[in-house]
Amino acid sequence: MFERQSRAARHTALIEGFPEYVALEERAAEIRLYEVGVIPGLLQTPEYAATLEADAVRREAITSEQADERVELLVKRQKSLVRSPSPLITAVLDEGCIRRPMGAPSAMDAQLARLLEFAEQPNTVLQVAPFSMGARRPFSLPVTVLTMPDRSLVSYAESAHRGHLERESTFVLPMVAAYHQLQAEALSQAASVAMIEQLRKGTP
């Protein structure tokens, strides 16, 4: 674990707390994701990820070398999920994630196709939290909850400059309860897939 952490820490563009999270993600039995505004990293195509990082370079938030490092690490994180037993991955995306154009139309179409492929996997659940949820949406910021092989829970959340890992059940359990509420209010996977397919066809 420490070797993985030190390897991830060499990626100087990563925010504080993220390398430790990546080491835990590599071992997690279950990963629950909620994202606002952009597709979650684990579901991004390399082209989509590169578009995001290119904008960070344009804003001079990172260097082009750091952008390459981030995309490279993202690909490695995705590959680490191909293991046995497979982790259960539940992803709830705010509707803005799929409606926000990112890069060329062809790149965005490929990203939406990637989401549909994700939804077809036997160890995944994909749901869209529609705008119509309004105030019933329990989270306003991205949230990740990991269930480790020993069934312990870890949550991870980010601000603009740092990430925070929480292992204390007093704080993590209410987050899990809120996540279940989010899933109950979100569209079913079938309805979510239908919404994404309509977007690919260019229909409202």
Image (cartoon, rainbow, N blue to C red):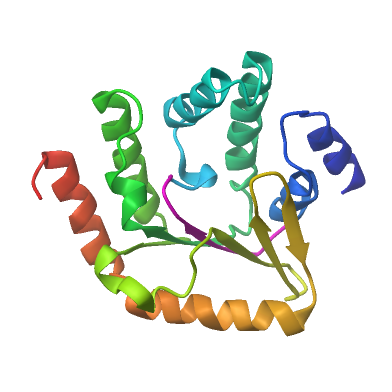
Number of callouts in the render?
0
Q: Can you give x and y, in whole percent of width and height, for residue 179 in the image?
A: 51, 75
Asked whether the viewer can see residue 69, the reply is yes
Residue at the spot x=26%, y=33% of the render? Answer: 109
Query: Position of 117 compared to 193: left or right?
Result: right
Which corner quadrant of the image does residue 13 belong to? top right
Q: Is 198 situated left or right of 107 in this image?
A: left
Q: Is residue 126 left or right of residue 150?
A: left
Task: Give the residue drawn at x 73%, y 48%.
Answer: 162
Tell me the residue at 35%/25% (across/down).
103
- Relative height, residue 78 to residue 65 (above, below): below
Residue sitting at 80 percent across and 77 percent down? 168
State the residue lying farthest toward the front: 59
80, 65: nearer the viewer: 65
Within the magenta stretch, is there residue 36?
yes
Horizontal and vertical percent for residue 130? 28, 64
Magenta-drawn stretch contains 76: no
Q: Residue 12: x, y in percent? A: 78, 28
Horizontal and vertical percent for residue 74? 60, 35
- In-image side of 115 versus 154 (left or right): left
Q: Is residue 30 visible?
A: no
**Residue 68 image-quadrant placement:** top right
- Residue that sits furthest to the top in the current view: 64
Q: Which residues are magenta?
A: 27-38
Foreground residue among 122 and 25: 25
* Residue positioned most to the right: 2
